[in-house]
Amino acid sequence: MIVTKDTTLRELNEAPELAVARDSLISGGGYFEGETADLSLEDLNVRFGTWSWKDMVYGVTRLLTALKDRGDVCRVYSGEEIAADPRKEQAKLFWLPADRKRHPEFVILMSGGAYGAVCTLPESLPVAAKLNELGFDCFCLNYRTAVPEDIENGLFPKPADDFAAAWNYIREREQDFGVEAENYIAGGFSAGGHLAAMWGTAHKGARHYDIPQPKMLMLDYPLISTDTMDDGPVKTFMLNMMFGEGHDRPAEEEYMIHHHIDRNYPPVYHVQALDDPTVLPVNASLLKAALEQMDVPYRQELTETGGHGFGLGSEMDAAGWVDRAVKYYEEVIK
């Protein structure tokens, strides 16, 4: 299969070469249904602005190559677990091993989508492709997202449960994947960046699940505090889906990252555009202040423009941020 700017979501979803990724290139949100299924990658670029069709072609092409070699898309949970809770079917790992592995650490990436979708196609896949070029094995995690019934009890902590299940899945198959499970970097975008940032905390992250801390966090325009969201019906709806209708203030504060950063928080590489209309730049300020207060090593890259959801951002001000993140990783970890 040759992927171009004219390739549609429907064509990607129905391609035999991508059968293992069916309904998972963007999970949740119904992107492969109705009129959106017939949008081309260029159409998606026009509709969402920051979803570069060139980056999407680059990411899917890398996935196709990986699947021909050793790559795979794996269910995180067992058949018995999925039978007991069908929503766990959504938790999947895209495995993209590097052609020439040059680092002992591997990277787990989590895309965003306001916890209503996981936009692996425009965000994680292109970044994983670049990291593969730089010698890192990569996994892209699709975690569970909100559905109408979550209005009662809330989605959380299901995404973090899925991260823990994914890490344990990798640990149990270290020899198959050729990795050491404790040598990992966690990265995320938007809501996935919130999940990755939360993974560094003691009360909701790796330590809560008795899992080793990641060596570093790579955070691309992550939500840090729900207080930074504009008040209105959209915010109310999202909070109710995340925490459950009738939740209290402490429930929200439990997931505000800057309140829970401690001295054992992993080093951070953070990139965000100052004109981001969705995750406002105040999130970057809150993150920076909390990291500095706890003497956590970090590097923060703020670009004048770029908006929200740019992923690899090869045509944005942030172009090359993955290379710079790797250089920082080499300074901090090596």
Image: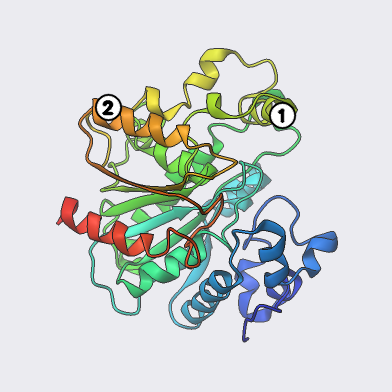
Residue named by callout 1? 237
Q: Residues within 10 Å of mark 1 (few under 14, many from 20)?
A: few
Left or right of 22: which side holds 38?
A: right
Q: Nearer the viewer, residue 285 or 261?
A: 285
Q: Nearer the viewer, residue 84 or 59?
A: 59
For the residue marked with disc 2, what is the amino acid? Asp
Q: Residue 165: where, in percent of width, then height? A: 46, 46
Question: Which quarter of the picture shows residue 180?
Answer: bottom left
Q: Residue 42: where, in percent of width, then height? A: 68, 71
Q: Residue 121: where, in percent of width, then height? A: 59, 63
Label 1's element?
Answer: helix
Residue named by callout 2? 262
Q: Residue 167: where, in percent of width, then height? A: 39, 50
**Vertical position of residue 176 compared to residue 232: above or below:** below
| Residue found at the very far bottom of the displayed protein | 2
For the residue marked with disc 1, what is the amino acid? Phe
The quadrant in which the N terminus is found is bottom right
Residue at 28% in and 73% down: 101
Q: Residues within 10 Å of mark 2 (few under 14, many from 20)?
A: some
Q: Earlier in the sequence, mark 1 or mark 2?
A: 1
The quadrant in which the C terminus is found is bottom left
